[in-house]
Amino acid sequence: MIIKKYTYLQHSNKPQMWKIEQCQFHPELNLIVGKNASGKTRIVNTINNLGGLLSGGRIGSGNWEIVFQKDQKTEIQYSLSIENYQVLKETFIENEQIRLERDSSGKGTIWAEKLQQKIEFQIETHELAAVKKCDSIQHPFLSALSQWSSFLRTYRFATDFGRNTMAIIVNSTGTETREEDFDKDPDKIIALYNDAIKQWGSRFFEEIKKDMQFLNYNLKEITIESVGKIQAPPASLYAFHIQEEDLEYKIPQREISQGMFRALALIIHLNYLQFSSSAQSCILIDDIGEGLDFERSSRLIKLILKKFSSKDNVSPVQIFMTSNDRFVMNAIPLDYWLLIDRIPGGMNIFSKKNSPEMFEEFEFTGLNNFDFLASEYFKG
């Protein structure tokens, strides 16, 4: 399931009001570009926050109106309004049929599949009906939202990406960790890799090796080795060690360059999604390519496009990436761009969907993609 259209509003009618209005997303890849402080990361955060809410996370404030494309025959419109930890309004519409609606009192109606009629309900005002009423027998349509949120992944590429995080492993064979939800936490990369090797063995490593080689990182071996112990209860601390083809020694995790580790961590995460058939929904990557040189940054983009092309996947994944990096922008066609121009109270968003003539005219200038942003060509 992909996001087709997206509207978000926060702090309505207040000085700090901020809005994204009727943004149309590309079904496969969306590169969100803009100058510093334009709101790129904020867009990613609103999508990530929605995923958290639909997974049962704590609510805060915000207003979402989203159109999802579930498949070729099914379109879902989901609206949610929250203020001061209270749900004010929530609706779920499937192919123009209202399946769920509730108000600020927590009262509402929902379609019951087995009964073939709408029934009334009441829940707490701080609860989402889409979460509370999810029932595969009576309300199976709500599973689309829960599945979308459960497969959503967010990666902050410009962070240390788990480079300063070790894993706690509780037995000498190195197979059991105390880590939970490691497939969703970007920093628990050791536990994730450990689980991948348990499930898929050398086949998983060979895929990592191939992808890293595409970025001109020639790895011979990746191991998880003990680097210390804790006393209560007894357990060992483990970290990565890697060996490159042209070196006779292993490099401990703390000495791996930040750029290389970011690339390795992202590739491990993305391959884990593919191997586990979890790459069905939404991937958010903030500051993609940060810390990589031109060649590796460009190759990383090509690798992501290749791995998650709908031609290669029965269930396509929708990817959102943010960047103001010249190398990244020049590597991704303008067809996938969402260019952000900050204005009071929100932003203007330019894409080939809403401004086709402007994008086509720029392509005839012969300039690099980066110049579209740097020259502010979009301002006319």
Image: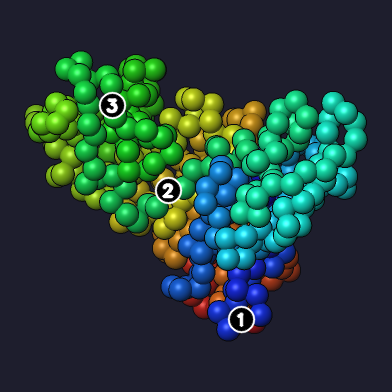
The numbered mark at residue 155 is 2
Secondary-structure class at tag 3: loop
Q: Residue at x 27, y 19 (%)?
A: 175
Q: Measured along the vertical axis of the image, is residue 8 above or below residue 225?
A: below
**1 or 2: mark nearer the eye:** 1
Q: Residue at x 73, y 57 (%)?
A: 105
Mark 2: amino acid: Tyr
The numbered mark at residue 128 is none
Mark 3 / mark 2, whichever is N-terminal:
2
Mark 3: give few (<14), some (14-19) or many (20+) Cα within 10 Å. many
> How much space separates mark 3 and mark 1, taking CA atoms?
47 Å
Q: Residue at x 69, y 68 (%)?
A: 21
Q: Residue 252: percent from the left, percent from the top?
A: 14, 37
Q: Residue 96: percent from the left, percent from the top?
A: 87, 47
Mark 1: amino acid: Lys
Q: Measured along the vertical axis of the image, is residue 144 above or below residue 63?
A: above
Please state which of residues 249 and 125 is positioned toward the viewer in this rendering. Answer: 125
Mark 1 / mark 2, whichever is N-terminal:
1
Q: Residue 64: percent from the left, percent from the top?
A: 67, 59
Please state which of residues 350 and 19 is positioned toward the viewer in this rendering. Answer: 19
Residue 12, quarter of the rendered image: bottom right
Residue identified by numbered label 3: 177
Mark 2: give few (<14), some (14-19) or many (20+) Cα within 10 Å. many
